[in-house]
Structure formats: C-alpha cells, structure tokens
Amino acid sequence: FGPFWTDKNSYINFLICRFGPYFCQPVIAGLSDEDKPFICTMDSIGAKELAKDFVVSGTASESLYGACEAMFKPDMEPEELFETISQALLSSVDRDCLSGWGGHVYVVTPTEVKERILKGRMD
C-alpha cells in the first residue's frame, strides 16, 4: 500500500476522495484482516465518519438514525441483522417522500456476502 497508508481502509478512502467532491455519501463496509467489522461513511469531500455500531446515509438518513438506534443491538446473528436492517430501511423510506422503491441489503460474514433486494413503495 505504500508508505502513506497504514491499512486498506485508509487506501480506499484516498482512492474515493482524491477526485472529489462527489454528490453522494458512500457507505464503506467490510471485514479487516482479523475478521473484525469495519464501517464508515464519507461526506461529499471525503471526510470519514467511523462507527462501531452502524452508519447511515442518503435522503432518509434522519429517519434511519432513529430506526437504527431503536433496533440495533451488538453481536446479532446474520439473519437477525438482515431483518433489523430491512425493517429500519423500509420504515425510514416510508417516512420520506424523496425515498422510495426499496434497497439492497448486503450482509458480510467471514465466509460469504449475501445480497438481498427489498421492494418498497413505488410512488
């Protein structure tokens, strides 16, 4: 990774923000070399917001914060985590007229990455 980056996360952050600003808020999620979870989000100029529990982004982020704070608990199993993410996402986009159709939920474990597509309202 070169002399400037101490880990993969710093390198990915550099790659994403060096050509910015972007008009989006990417969520970066994955596992470290020790299979520890890593999640962060970035603003439009590339500043990272690191978290140990959850991050939110997008047009429904205000609603998502409340739903995630109410439903999240540490050390959930993959299926329980998927259900929690899905409920928080669908309940939040239902409260925001600029959000809508559903979402993609990825659950990352040391052995696999599961993607499921949620369908929501279409108005």
Image (cartoon, helix red, strand yellow):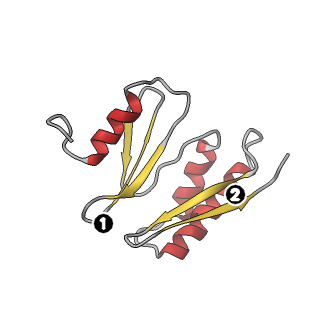
Q: Closer to the camera: disc 1 or disc 2?
A: 1
- Image quadrant where residue 24 sits: top right
Instruction: Tell me which numbered mark, 1 or 2, is placed earlier along the sequence.
Output: 1
Residue at the farthest right position: 123
Residue 27, disc: none
The kind of residue on which mark 2 rests is Leu
117 versus 43 height, above or below:
below
Residue 35, disc: 1
Give the percent coordinates (x, y) of residue 50. 36, 45
Q: Secondary structure at mark 1?
A: loop
Q: Is residue 107 left or right of residue 98?
A: left
At 52% from the left edge and 57% from the top edge, which residue is drawn? 69
The kind of residue on which mark 1 rests is Asp
Q: Secondary structure at mark 2?
A: helix
Q: Residues within 10 Å of mark 2 (few under 14, many from 20)?
A: many
Q: Tell me the quadrant of the picture where the C terminus can be found.
A: top right
Give the percent coordinates (x, y) of residue 111. 40, 73
Q: Identify the residue position indicated by label 2 in the image.
A: 90
